[in-house]
Image (cartoon, rainbow, N blue to C red):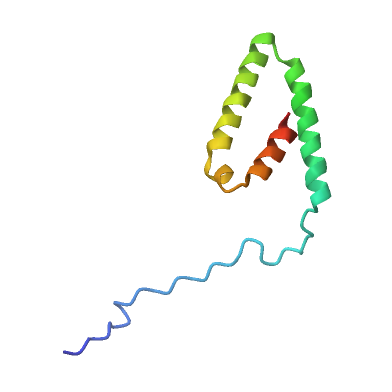
């Protein structure tokens, strides 16, 4: 039994190839580790300043959320892949 080739009318038109969204854009350097550390410190300082501006009830809610997030993170899939030493290092950094 032979297969019949579809006629040109039955064929679906080919989809145009999608170009990358970054095609034609100039190359840019990736962020260095130092820049990530500085950005993290800046965000931590902003968080502290915003926390001080909250009402006492808002501060209590924020602290509760942070504790709940920490517990969920330590039980999450990424945390399971860390060694005991890495977990201890991260716990020491958060305090």
Q: In the figure, residue 92 lies in which quadrant?
A: top right
Check the image and report above or below for 67 versus 14.
above
Residue 3 image point, x, y percent: 22, 86
**Residue located 75% across and 16% down the image:** 53
Query: 62 or 80: nearer the eye?
Result: 80
Residue 51 image point, x, y percent: 73, 20
Query: 37 or 13: nearer the eye?
Result: 37
Quarter of the figure with the C terminus: top right
Check the image and report above or below for 82 versus 65.
below
**Residue 56 in the figure: left or right of residue 30:** left
**Residue located 27% across and 82% down the image:** 6
Residue 41 image point, x, y percent: 80, 36
**Residue located 63% across and 43% down the image:** 84
**Residue 44 in the figure: left or right of residue 4:** right
Quarter of the figure with the N terminus: bottom left
Query: 83 or 5: nearer the eye?
Result: 83
Check the image and report above or below for 23 versus 81.
below
């Amino acid at each position: 039994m032979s297969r019949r080739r579809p006629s040109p009318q039955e064929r679906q038109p080919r989809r145009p190839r999608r170009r990358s969204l970054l095609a034609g854009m100039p190359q840019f350097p990736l962020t260095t580790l130092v820049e990530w550390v500085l950005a993290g410190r800046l965000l931590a300082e902003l968080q502290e300043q915003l926390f001080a501006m909250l009402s006492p009830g808002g501060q209590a809610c924020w602290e509760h959320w942070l504790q709940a997030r920490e517990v969920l993170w330590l039980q999450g899939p990424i945390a399971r892949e860390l060694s005991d030493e890495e977990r201890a290092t991260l716990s020491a950094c958060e305090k």
